[in-house]
Amino acid sequence: MVGAISSGQIAEYIGRKGSLMISAIPNIIGWLSISFAKDLSFLYMGRLLEGFGVGIISYTVPVYIAEIAPQNLRGGLGSVNQLSVTIGIMLSYLLGLFVNWRVLAVLGTLPCLALIPGLFFIPESPRWLAKMGLTEDFETSLQVLRGFDADISVEVNEIKRAVASTSRKSTIRFADLKQRRYWLPLMIGIGLLVLQQLGGTNGVIFYSSNIFLSAGISSSNAATFGVGAIQVVATAVSTWLVDKTGRRLLLIVSSSGMAVSLLIVAVAFFLKSFVDEDSTLYGALGIISVVGVVLMIVAFSLGMGPIPWLIMSEILPVKIKGLAGSVATLANWFFSWVVTATAPLLLAWSSGGTFTLYTLMCAFTVAFVTIWVPETKGKTLEEIQFSFR
């Protein structure tokens, strides 16, 4: 959450590449602190540093991708962010089956160490350069991104027009947020990122081993890796679909699928409390609850996983992007913490009740998307922001 608060300002003042470089440093120190921990305080310190780094990354990466991608590929490239996250989760599940947590923490430093030199080989965001008044650098960056033979004149003029009304050091006042062009995209961005968490996915994923054990599956760690692999496949499908079907349809299908899947799990857990543990029906209900959890994760990965971050990076106006992006990312990580902290307490209280609660939140998400979320497929960032005026 602290990383999220500072992410927007860091990305605004030193650029998208600079903020990613800064984020790698606490990540590396954090992993080493965990790996060579002498007592609990090292683990806490490592996790605090990791959290700070990830808080910065989780805002900066989708914004950077949205700002460099051509409009016809922006959805797919933006979804690659979440695809990479799911690959990382799956790899940590897989490696965790074979190595202890100290070795796993050392392995965590490898992507961070690769990131720092890698950033020297990619261009800065042309939209950020344009906003900072670096016209020559901005055109060079855009030319490198589009290819040296590409005609970038139309895109250059669009970006120049979009930033012309925003001075380099413009400050946003809270009074400005009363304007529809600011409060509406801010509400949609925050709303989607909050609802992404309130569906309970992190609670289910982080405690999936416990859920599988309670469902009667003994090799729960292997089953958890299976869930990680399914998540990667489903997110890859979303990455392929998002620029074909659009964002809204995938979000509605995804949240509806989550609601149905969670309802199946809730009913299975409720019925288990009335059935004898030695009966065939009890075992069948255990299998049904696991199938429901897997279907929920597939549905989440198809839309509610990657698309809220993508839409947040697309719809926020240039003038408030730093502040609003920080607030949206902060809200996401705050509710991630709430869900993760309450999940074991709720599951201990009532597994069926917990999944019913998550079902209701997913049903609310369907309504929210249907009423408020615009389609952004095939539009430039400038066109999207102009549509809110």
Image (cartoon, grey):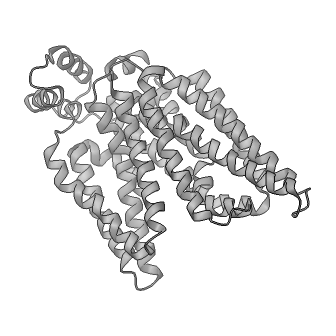
Q: Give whichever of 144, 84 is nearer the camera.
A: 84
Q: Is residue 209 left or right of residue 142?
A: right
Task: Return the x and y of residue 223 as percentages of the image width and height.
Answer: 59, 58
Q: Residue at x 41, y 36 (%)?
A: 79
Q: Give whichever of 210, 370 is nearer the camera.
A: 210
Q: Is residue 359 left or right of residue 113?
A: right
Task: Return the x and y of residue 238 as percentages of the image width and height.
Answer: 47, 33
Quarter of the figure that contains the N terminus: bottom left
Tell which residue pokes out farthest to the front in this image.
Answer: 280
Task: Return the x and y of residue 60 as percentages of the image width and height.
Answer: 33, 44
Up-down: is 338 above or below 166? below
Q: Is residue 260 left or right of residue 18?
A: right
Tell which residue pokes out farthest to the bottom in this image.
Answer: 38
Q: How many dots with numbers?
A: 0
Q: Give whichever of 151, 104 is nearer the camera.
A: 104
Q: Residue at x 53, y 35 (%)?
A: 302
Q: Give whichever of 205, 369 is nearer the camera.
A: 205
Q: Residue at x 69, y 64 (%)?
A: 213
